[in-house]
């Protein structure tokens, strides 16, 4: 059963003022109650069909590739991702671009905010199951801004529309509340060994205040961090400057499927620009 809306950080469409207040303070918030059960059922069906289309090779390669897969061999028989999924799922498209989402994003990012739906992987369906067939791996501490420190698309708010609720069993989001206010350095060293372009800004955050401690490279416990659990149909919003990571599932026989993407408040890139550091963009 869904937790009541009085859960800290969880807001319904009737209290967007509360959601914006919480988000501005802590860098994240959950939007609950916008999608009906049948909306989520349709989103699930269309995403699963698209995923099967990628595995079968029925969908154009635009929608499925090994770009996010760490172990390419596994990608031949299983697809953890469908890219640009809003182009093949009308239910996803209307959920992420509906009036409530647009209203929230205008309030968070300004009147000219735009949805990244046809650029840079677009909106992605992610099947982050932990089992043996999966090529999905855990994601250590990062801010999404660190995936593109030389771009001028920022600020940004990421959304994650949950098809499966989350728990310790299937994995969940860890965040450091308020860390979006810190001026976090670009990842000049990171666990993936990804080169940072010369054009990168040295640091990024909602204010110029320095972080009180260095961002860990992996999954270390951070002072002040909290776990964010989602119910089916919830949309978690988080700031691109927020420190976050994903906790690994404790049960390999579970699923954690969601649709994720972002709205941006900066300059929209020209078509075909692919400057995101792919390993950090997840
Ligand atoms: Fe992220």
Image (cartoon, rainbow, N blue to C red):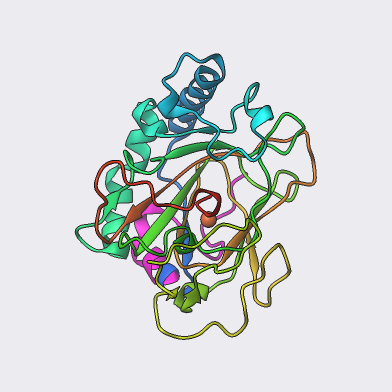
Question: Looking at the image, which is closer to me, 43 or 63?
Answer: 63
Q: Residue at 73% x, 70% y: name it.
A: 221
* Vertical relation: 87 (above or below) 244: above
Residue 167 versus residue 240 in the image, above or below: above
- Is residue 93 found left or right of 196 in the rendered image? left
The answer to whether residue 49 is magenta is no
Q: Residue furthest left?
A: 111
Task: Say whether residue 5 is magenta.
Answer: yes
Q: Position of residue 34 (x, y in %)?
A: 40, 45
Q: Which residues are magenta?
A: 1-22
Where's residue 235, x and y in %? 47, 49
Residue 115 percent location from the top left of the image: 30, 47
Q: Foreground residue, 156 or 135?
A: 135
Residue nearer the viewer, 152 or 86 = 152
> Is 202 situated above or below 235?
below
Residue placed farthest to the front in the image? 198
Residue under the point 45% across and 75% down = 203
Q: Quadrant of the N terminus?
A: top right
Query: In this figure, what is the number of numbered marks?
Result: 0
Q: Position of residue 63 (x, y in %)?
A: 44, 28
Residue in the image at 64% along x and 40% along y: 70
Residue 101 against residue 215 in the figure, above or below: above
Query: Camera-side residue: 140 or 151?
Result: 151
Q: Quadrant location of residue 42?
A: top left
Residue at 68% in and 45% down: 137
């Amino acid at each position: 059963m869904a937790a009541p809306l009085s859960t800290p950080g969880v807001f319904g469409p009737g209290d967007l003022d509360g959601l914006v207040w919480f988000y501005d303070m802590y860098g994240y918030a959950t939007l609950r109650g916008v999608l009906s059960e049948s909306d989520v059922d349709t989103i699930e069906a269309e995403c699963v069909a698209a995923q099967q289309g990628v595995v079968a090779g029925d969908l154009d390669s635009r929608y499925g590739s090994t770009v996010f897969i760490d172990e390419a061999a596994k990608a031949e028989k299983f697809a953890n991702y469908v890219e640009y999924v809003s182009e093949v799922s009308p239910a996803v498209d209307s959920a992420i671009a509906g009036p409530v989402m647009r209203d929230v994003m205008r309030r968070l990012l300004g009147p000219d905010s735009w949805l990244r739906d046809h650029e840079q992987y677009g909106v992605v369906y992610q099947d982050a199951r932990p089992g043996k067939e999966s090529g999905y791996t855990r994601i250590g501490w990062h801010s999404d801004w660190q995936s593109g420190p030389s771009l001028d698309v920022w600020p940004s708010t990421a959304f994650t529309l949950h098809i499966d609720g989350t728990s310790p069993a299937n994995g969940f989001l860890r965040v450091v509340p308020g860390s979006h206010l810190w001026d976090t350095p670009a990842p000049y060293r990171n666990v993936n060994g990804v080169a940072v372009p010369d054009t990168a800004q040295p640091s990024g955050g909602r204010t110029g205040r320095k972080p009180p401690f260095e961002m860990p490279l992996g999954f270390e416990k951070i002072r002040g961090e909290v776990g964010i659990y989602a119910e089916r149909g919830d949309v978690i919003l988080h700031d691109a400057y927020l420190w976050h990571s994903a906790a690994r599932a404790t049960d390999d026989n579970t699923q954690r499927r969601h649709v994720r993407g972002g709205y941006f408040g900066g300059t929209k890139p020209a078509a075909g620009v692919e400057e995101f550091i792919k390993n950090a963009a997840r």
